[in-house]
Image (cartoon, helix red, strand yellow):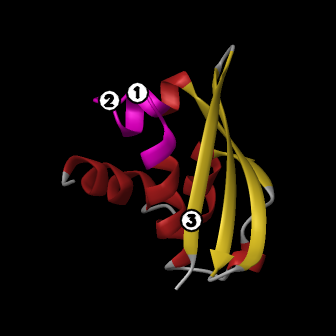
């Protein structure tokens, strides 16, 4: 089981989140994800903090591909370019928590 560790910092346009994927004590990969304010409003309108949205987004990605296939740096909404079902799925997961 891969553990997903997320730390987000506010930026002028939203947030920059560092994501570390670990398998037990072993670090698998690190990623930087930009979350623009409009993306947070669109995908998780009830939250001001993108941390849980990013964590759920990585869980979504890991259901579909190995950590080595996930881009190292990307904008959160880019996920939808590769997986068209992303936005509908993530809205349902965030709303159903």
Sequence order check, earlier mark of 3 and 1:
3
Horizontal side, residue 41 vs residue 81: left or right: left
**Of the two numbered discs 3 and 1 in the rendering, the one whose residue sits closer to the viewer:** 3
Q: Which residue ends up furthest to the right in the rendered image? A: 72
Is 36 or 56 nearer to us in this picture?
56
Seen at 69% across and 80% down, the residue is 25
Is 27 or 59 nearer to us in this picture?
27
Q: Is residue 62 above or below residue 48?
A: below
Residue 12 x %, y %: 69, 13
Circle 1/circle 2 CB separation < 8 Å: yes
Q: Which mark is residue 4?
A: 3
Q: Which mark is residue 57?
A: none
Seen at 55% across and 54% down, the residue is 80
Q: Which residue is mark 2?
A: 45
Q: Which residue is mark 1?
A: 41
Pointer 2 local density, CA inside 10 Å: few below 14, some 14–19, many at least 20: few
Local secondary structure at mark 3: strand
Local secondary structure at mark 1: helix
**In the image, is residue 49 part of the stretch drawn in magenta?**
yes
Is 86 or 62 nearer to us in this picture?
62
**In the image, is residue 73 part of the stretch drawn in magenta?**
no
Bounds of the magenta span?
40-52
């Amino acid at each position: 089981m891969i553990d997903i560790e997320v730390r987000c910092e506010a930026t002028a346009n939203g947030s920059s989140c560092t994501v570390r994927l670990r398998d037990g004590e072993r670090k698998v990969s690190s990623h930087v994800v930009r979350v623009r304010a409009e993306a947070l409003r669109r995908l998780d309108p009830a939250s001001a903090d993108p941390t849980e949205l990013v964590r759920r987004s990585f869980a979504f990605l890991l259901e579909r591909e190995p950590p080595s296939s996930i881009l190292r740096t990307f904008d959160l909404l880019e996920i939808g370019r590769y997986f068209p079902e992303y936005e509908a799925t993530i809205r349902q997961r965030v709303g159903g928590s």
